[in-house]
Amino acid sequence: MLKISGWGNYPKINCKVEIPSSENEIKFNENEKIISRGLGRSYGDSSLQTNKTIITKNLNQIISFDEELGVICVQSGISSDELLKILIPKGWFLPVSPGTKFVTLGGMVASDVHGKNHHLEGSFGDHLISLKIKISNSEVMYCSDDFNSDLFWATIGGMGLTGIITEIKFKLKKISSYKINQEVTVTQNLEEVMSLFEKYKNSTYTVAWIDCLSKGSSFGRSVFFKGEHKLSQGKISYNPKYILRIPFFFPSWILNYFSIKLFNYFYFYSNKFFTKKEVDGDSFFYPLDKISHWNKIYGKNGFIQYQFLVPKKGSLEAIREVLEKVTHSKEASFLSVLKLFKKGNKGLLSFPDEGFTLAMDFQVNEKTFRLLSELDKIVMKHSGKVYLAKDSRLSKDSFSLMNYDADGLRNILNKYNIKNFHSEQSERLNIL
Ligand SMILES: Cc1cc2nc3c(=O)[nH]c(=O)nc-3n(C[C@H](O)[C@H](O)[C@H](O)COP(=O)(O)OP(=O)(O)OC[C@H]3O[C@@H](n4cnc5c(N)ncnc54)[C@H](O)[C@@H]3O)c2cc1C
């Protein structure tokens, strides 16, 4: 047994862990509860199962790569980091990138991850061609949008509950440089930043960092980023740089209302002076990866990232209500991340859908859970939902009222006689 957790270091659970080095080594009994785990970058308990957690990181081979068409088939345990080292020098990039490259492709499918381009290019599931899934100890299924499409769409965003994804075939994005032309706009309040997303809805990448501790006339002041791939000729180089490593858990008192307020203040003012510049892709897509193990700054008790989505109509009121509650609680969050989504895909448990999504980090303490339950109420009142890849504490009642098609998922599991896949999260939320 090994005590493991998601990226939030909460909860930490004793799990029996297996790390197969080939697909043939993945073995389990007929009634055994298991779950897959990639690099454990989901924040909560979605990749944990006490009975057996299967870590896929050694299934990391490229099966085929059509360098002309930009179509690749990989084993699910390969990481985005491993893949970028091969793709970028050849002029290809991932169609969708979450905020870290230390994720497996299997994890990207199972969470149907989104990046800063969802408003134009959708989530990772929208770029898939086909999947191979081990649905029981003896049965493997192939699926795509045309073939076993119900299993395909149950697996995209399905949080590992339909089986172990072993192979993924998908379309890549052509690039001629790994540089991004970035433009930064500082906005004075929430309304202003939300209108910038509308104004720049044709820009490929948009995201905003909100200072969720500012009050009064600067309530919701933000730094809005937009970016486009630079057009260039010649060889594309890729030299990832890692600057800092957090070696130990910080004492929990270091992060408090005042230290976070100070950080947010400096972040806001430091960006006021940089409007247009060329940045390398890693700095634009994965800024936090430069500090390895940054999750330790929240201390041993860990933290929760609360990411919710609210439909576009009414989103300003909903986000304002949430931010007011957070400001009032004095439970501080570092700059929070705001993104705009277009309509979602057919993934039954997929998170993205038309609207705004906001992600905030909270250190775990006795007040956090009360605050987050209050935020759930606001989100539900506005017909919103919480992202399962970030969740470790939602109640089953709240989950059942959010826009996830758990009934649809259960029907598909019955149809294909899929029984083994249960995470600590799926049990807490009563998904199956
Ligand atoms: C700094 C940071 C930034 C992030 N930014 C974003 C973002 O911008 N957008 C976004 O969408 N997400 C974001 N995330 C979340 C992250 O992209 C997802 O949680 C992703 O699923 C993690 O991949 P993983 O390989 O670590 O999966 P894990 O965390 O190990 O697992 C996540 C889920 O995928 C399932 N799974 C993993 N592998 C398989 C497999 N082979 N077969 C079936 N199921 C499997 C697990 O059972 C679990 O339910 C971020 C996370 C971090 C730490």
Image (tube, rainbow, N blue to C red):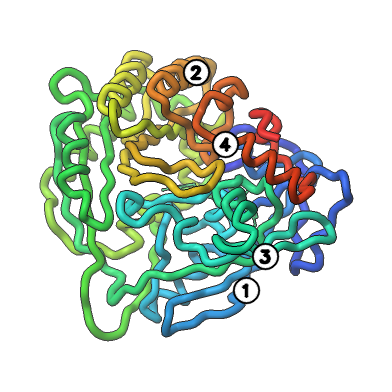
The residue sitting at 17% across, 18% down in the picture is: 216
| Image quadrant containing the N terminus | top right
Mark-to-mark CA distance, 3 and 1: 18 Å
The residue type indicated by label 2 comes to Ser
In the rendering, at what x and y percent does residue 12 appear?
66, 35
Does the rendering let one see residue 244?
A: no
Which residue was labeled with disc 1?
Answer: 61
Which residue was labeled with disc 2?
Answer: 373
Does the rendering let one see residue 255?
A: yes
Whichever of labels 3 and 2 marks the residue nearer the N terminus, that label is 3
Is mark 4 in CB contact (under 8 Å) with mark 2? no
Which residue was labeled with disc 4?
Answer: 405
Answer left or right for 399 relative to 334: right
The residue type indicated by label 3 comes to Tyr
Give the answer, above or below, for where 274 lies relative to 424.
Answer: below
| Mark 4 close to ligand 1, CB under 8 Å | no
Mark-to-mark CA distance, 4 and 1: 33 Å
Which residue was labeled with disc 3?
Answer: 142
| Image quadrant containing the C terminus | top right
| Mark 2 crowd level (few <14, some 14–19, many ≥20, 10 Å Cα) | some
Res 214 quadrant in image: top left
Mark-to-mark CA distance, 3 and 2: 40 Å
| SS at mark 1 in the image | loop
